[in-house]
Image (cartoon, rainbow, N blue to C red):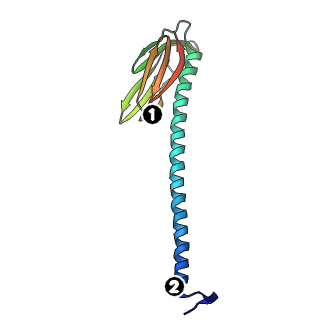
Amino acid sequence: MHFSFGYSLVETLALMFCICTVVMIGLLSLSLAMKTRARLVYDIDLLTDEFYAVDFMKHEYEVKAAASPSVSVTLNSLSFNANYDKKSGTISYLVMFKDGLYKIVRFGLSGEGNNYLIETKKEIHFSQEGKVFSVTIGDTIYDLGISE
């Protein structure tokens, strides 16, 4: 039995199967590409959060550090004396672990409030090597631009 254009039923079904297979492979590829893109965007967002937190700490130290900043560092905290806008005191960054997330919490001068700088699943800790202070987020070490 021949259909239009001289194709038989078997040939028509085979052609439809090939077209459907190509379409399904295309849709699967598109789906995988979208998932990969979403993962890459998520990873870039997390890295941007890390850069923001480190840049914030650097900038705050440059702007608000007292004449004799007296920096103190432990594995889970970094503190320095600050003097800004007629207020003086201590600014501290504390590492907290809660609900499976590491968080850097900023405790500022009176009236400035406290806030989270970053939340991540990567381990965070502060360190001092010689006279240079740094923060480690996951496997990456960021120099804070703070030295004694």
Which numbered marker is on residue 135? none
Which numbered marker is on residue 119? 1
Rendered position, 32 above or below 14: above
Relative image position of residue 71 (x, y in whole percent): 48, 11
The earlier-in-sequence mark between 2 and 1 is 2
Rendered position, 83 above or below 44: above
Q: Is residue 83 left or right of residue 125?
A: right
Q: Is residue 75 left or right of residue 20?
A: left
What amino acid type should be assigned to the residue bearing mark 2? Val
Relative image position of residue 28 (x, y in whole percent): 51, 61
Assign a secondary structure to mark 2. helix
Q: Nearer the viewer, residue 140 or 17?
A: 17
Which numbered marker is on residue 10? 2
Relative image position of residue 51 (x, y in whole percent): 55, 30
What amino acid type should be assigned to the residue bearing mark 1? Glu
**Residue occupying image coordinates x 53% and y 87%:** 9
Can residue 102 be seen at all in this image of the molecule?
yes
**Residue occupying image coordinates x 56% and y 73%:** 19
Of all residues, the one furthest to the top in this rendering is 68
**Residue occupying image coordinates x 52% and y 70%:** 21
Q: Nearer the viewer, residue 57 or 41?
A: 41
